[in-house]
Image (cartoon, helix red, strand yellow):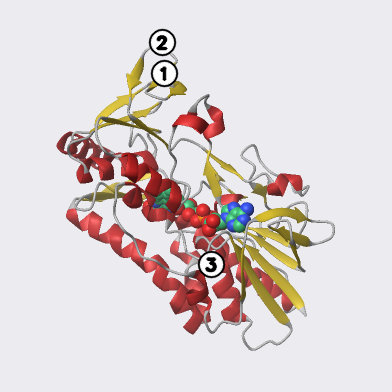
Amino acid sequence: MHRIVVLGAGYTGMMATVSLAARTKRRDDVRITLVNAAERFTERLRLHQTASGQRTVDLRVPDVLEGTGVEFVCGWVTAVDAEARTVRVDDERVLEYDTLVYALGAVTDTAAVPGAEDHAHTLDSTHDAELLAARLTGGTVAVCGSGLTGVESATEIAERHPDLDVVLIGRDEPGAALGPKAKAHLDAAFERLGVRVRSGVEVVKVLPDSVEFADGTGEAADVVLWTSGVRAAPLAAAAGLEVDERGRVVTDSSLRSVTRPEVYAVGDAAAVRQPFGVLHGTCQSGMPTAVHAATSIVRELEGKRPRAFRFGYYSKAVSLGRHDGLIQYTRPDGTPRRFALTGKGAAWYKEVVNSGVLRVFGILKAVPSAGAVWPRGGRYTR
Ligand SMILES: Cc1cc2nc3c(=O)[nH]c(=O)nc-3n(C[C@H](O)[C@H](O)[C@H](O)COP(=O)(O)OP(=O)(O)OC[C@H]3O[C@@H](n4cnc5c(N)ncnc54)[C@H](O)[C@@H]3O)c2cc1C
């Protein structure tokens, strides 16, 4: 019996599990176990919607796994022993594996700035997002981090709560990596929604009622949302796996840990290098890593060598509230192409993609080979 344990039932852990189950369903010598902190699937792509007070779909991991034969373990992974090939869950249960898929994602790096851990909200779980939603009762909301999560959060909150004063704060100009058309659309959306932008500032401290900048100035805030930077769980490093400066598992070209080839790392928890650099945490790149890992594990079970993973970005899809958005088409390395879609059409496109991601789990269960088209969604860079 070959025991495959998948850690994390986020987008990539689910994708890897469902792909593996579909591809091994005719074999009786493979057992797959999926471990996750909660039964409910966290729709991370929509946590800014949850944070603004909207309800999202209540998808249960066991329901998705129904009929696949996968064992689901609901619990918190506390340790991986890479030598003994075991995983400890909630400090009691010990799961043995022959192949491990490490898909525990990453969380916002609140340790980077004093006070952020204590006084800022994050979008790391549904619970975190609901806590923030409950605080949106009036005054100023400071969204720290001018990346796309900050942009989506600020616009979503401003649209849903027009009475709030929303300020987006960051070192870089929001949308700096967009082309001119998309950037102009973004600036107009901020204007329309009343989102104030403070760029070119570095937050050095978060206080209960304000944020402080490196230049000595600051911004009063009733609520602070921190979206800047990510770090992966310390579990991989503690297991002796080589990790990068963010704690992500460093992989070889086939997505196996460079330290332990029986450990595959995918999604936000993996530092996957491509010719243009290390992939940053997105579903767009994470889902293909999951399908690739599943395919590679099956190849290894069949005595074949895993293939190298190749990926290139194709767009940046950004929601600007529920009725507006922008899709910036990109080159494989993520730099903008000339073409961008903006407005209602872009909002619709983004919505179709977000809900489509969940439908893919069901499609893969029925048509295992469907996963093969996923990695090719990105433009290959070879
Ligand atoms: C507001 C927001 C909007 C986003 N929008 C986009 C977008 O438009 N497009 C895009 O491509 N990307 C987007 N992203 C990024 C995207 O959500 C992530 O890249 C994606 O979720 C990564 O998937 P993952 O499976 O690696 O990790 P996750 O989805 O984070 O899943 C990790 C899973 O592991 C579980 N887990 C973690 N630690 C443990 C433990 N110790 N024990 C047990 N279980 C554990 C978690 O509970 C979770 O279920 C967005 C992110 C945010 C926050």
Position of 178 relative to 317 (above/below): above
Q: Is residue 140 left or right of residue 129?
A: left
- Discs 1, 2 touching: Cβ within 8 Å: yes
Towards the viewer: 37 or 181: 37
Q: Secondary structure at mark 2?
A: loop
Q: Nearer the viewer, mark 3 or mark 1?
A: 1
Q: Which circle marks residue 14 in the picture?
A: 3
Position of 55 relative to 335 (above/below): below
Towards the viewer: 167 or 125: 125
- Reading the image, the residue beneath label 2 is 216
Residue 52, percent across and down?
30, 47
Residue 120, percent across and down?
44, 33
Crowd tier of the residue under label 3, counting other residues whose Cα lies within 10 Å: few below 14, some 14–19, many 20 or above: many
The outermost residue toward the right is 84
Which sits earlier in the primary sequence, circle 3 or circle 2?
Answer: 3
Q: Is residue 296 left or right of residue 377?
A: right
What type is the residue that disc 3 sits on? Answer: Met
Residue at screen point 44% across, 64% down: 377
What type is the residue that disc 2 sits on? Answer: Gly
Q: Secondary structure at mark 1?
A: strand
